[in-house]
Amino acid sequence: MGAGAVNASLVGRLHGKTRALGPVAGVSYRVASRIANTLRAGTAVRSADELDGIRIILFHSPPDQMETLFELLKAANIRWPGKSLVFCDCESVCAMAAHFQSRGASVAMVRKCPIPGRMTVGGTAPALTIANRLARDAGMKPVEIAPGQEDLFEAAVTLGSGALTPLIDYATALLRQCGIRDTEAVQLAAALFEQTAHDYAHSGRQSWAWYIREPAPERLVAQIMAAGDALRTVLSQLILFGLDAFDKHPEAAKAVREALRARGE
């Protein structure tokens, strides 16, 4: 069941690696024919009813057509018990998944992961087993997420990507202010974050700079004050967050807070 650029989705990457597709349904027979022709697989059908004869249904749609395709599939004359429905490269599928699960289907999702060479998968068996196989057939390593935890996973991705980029940019700006050339400042900032990530992958929390060695509060305060108005609050919060989160060096944390409070921060 598809809409949009199905060929650019996981479904398109499966051609030649899995069994031949069966019936292909869309919002119209014309769209279904276009999808089948583009994929060079499957047979266009005029109604989603014709998906009733198969055990595994793959679903792909861009966000702007999700609701339309969902309503068509929901209204189709399909006996859902025993069926496996796999959402491929789709966003916001929780409500849809719950609907089909309530009708007896097993449901899973598989979609791109920000980490190269991986795809995120989640859901219930046997659809989950199929989703894992689809990811591997596409040459990707599946990263399995517990049911209902998609938002938590996306929060982790945001924390390690979009939320982190401004910090790298600020580190670059501070290096420039030290007199380091622009290109080298960018490379040094990126290298600092890469090294931190590498060390964490090797040693976990123990790679933290102050896991054992207590930081000098006066040096931390000097760095915070030197960071400038735009970064001062963020840097102080990150430093104190680390001390609190790892439950380390409470006296140093207290000294930093008192020193900042004395400066009106």
Image: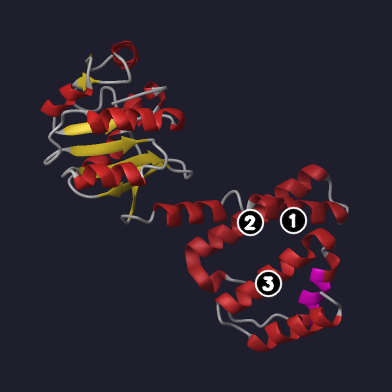
Q: CA distance from mark 1 to mark 3?
A: 14 Å
- Tell me which residue sits at (49%, 61%) in the image: 201
Residue 21 in which image quadrant: top left
Q: Which residue is mark 1?
A: 171
Residue that numbered label 2 is attached to? 193
- Counting the numbered discs, the total is 3
**Residues under labels 2 and 3: Cα distance?**
15 Å
Q: Residue at x 74, y 56 (%)?
A: 171
Indicate how the structure is coloured in the image: secondary structure
| Corner quadrant of residue 197 | bottom right
Mark 2 or mark 3, earlier in chain:
2
Give percent across and percent down for residue 233: 76, 67
Q: Nearest the camera: 156 or 91? A: 91
Q: Disc 2 to disc 1, how far (Cα)?
A: 10 Å
Whether pointer 2 and pointer 3 mark residues with C-beta atoms closer than 8 Å, the reply is no
Residue carrying label 3: 239
Residue type at mark 1 is Ala
Percent position of residue 248, x then y: 59, 82
Vertical order, 80 against 49 (above or below) = below
Is residue 85 found left or right of 8 in the rendered image? Answer: left
Q: Earlier in the sequence, mark 1 or mark 3?
A: 1
